Image: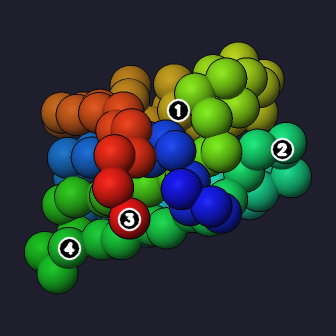
Amino acid sequence: MGDLASIISLHIFTVEPADFARLAKRATEALQKAATLPGFVSVNIFGNAPRTKLLLTSEWRSEHAWSRAEWDHVIAEVLTDLVENSRDHEFELYSHIAP
């Protein structure tokens, strides 16, 4: 598999439009912290046009690296804020299976 990431974390938050900018900023804080951790590959934040959904993806070299990131104090605090201030939250963890 070469340099391809083996784990992709996907979070989708359904938010109120009035909270969108603040929560997007919080998501950026968490993902900037993630970028400093071992095993990190890349991160993306997307928002839909009505400003009701935030999509966060992060790529990691291994499930272990991803798991360690989830226990990071800053990341955990931000994810808690996002979950508590969202109407809905979806999460999936995907493993790389083909190039």
Label 1 element class:
helix
Question: Based on the displayed image, in which of its 4 quarters is residue 65 positioned?
Answer: top right
Label 3 element class:
loop
**Discs 3, 1 touching: Cβ within 8 Å:** no
Disc 4 residue crowd, few under 14, some 14–19, many 20+, Cα 10 Å: few
Q: Using residue 63 as the reference point, say whether residue 37 is left or right of it.
A: right
Task: Residue under label 2, please give it.
Answer: 37
Question: Based on the displayed image, in which of its 4 quarters is residue 87 positioned?
Answer: top left
**Is 54 situated above or below 50?**
above
Q: Earlier in the sequence, mark 4 or mark 1?
A: 4
Task: Residue under label 1, please give it.
Answer: 79
Disc 1 residue crowd, few under 14, some 14–19, many 20+, Cα 10 Å: some
Q: Nearer the viewer, mark 4 or mark 3?
A: 3
Q: Earlier in the sequence, mark 2 or mark 4?
A: 2
Name the outermost residue toward the bottom: 49
Q: Using residue 9 as the reference point, say whether residue 61 is left or right of it.
A: right
Disc 2 residue crowd, few under 14, some 14–19, many 20+, Cα 10 Å: some
Q: Nearer the viewer, mark 2 or mark 1?
A: 2
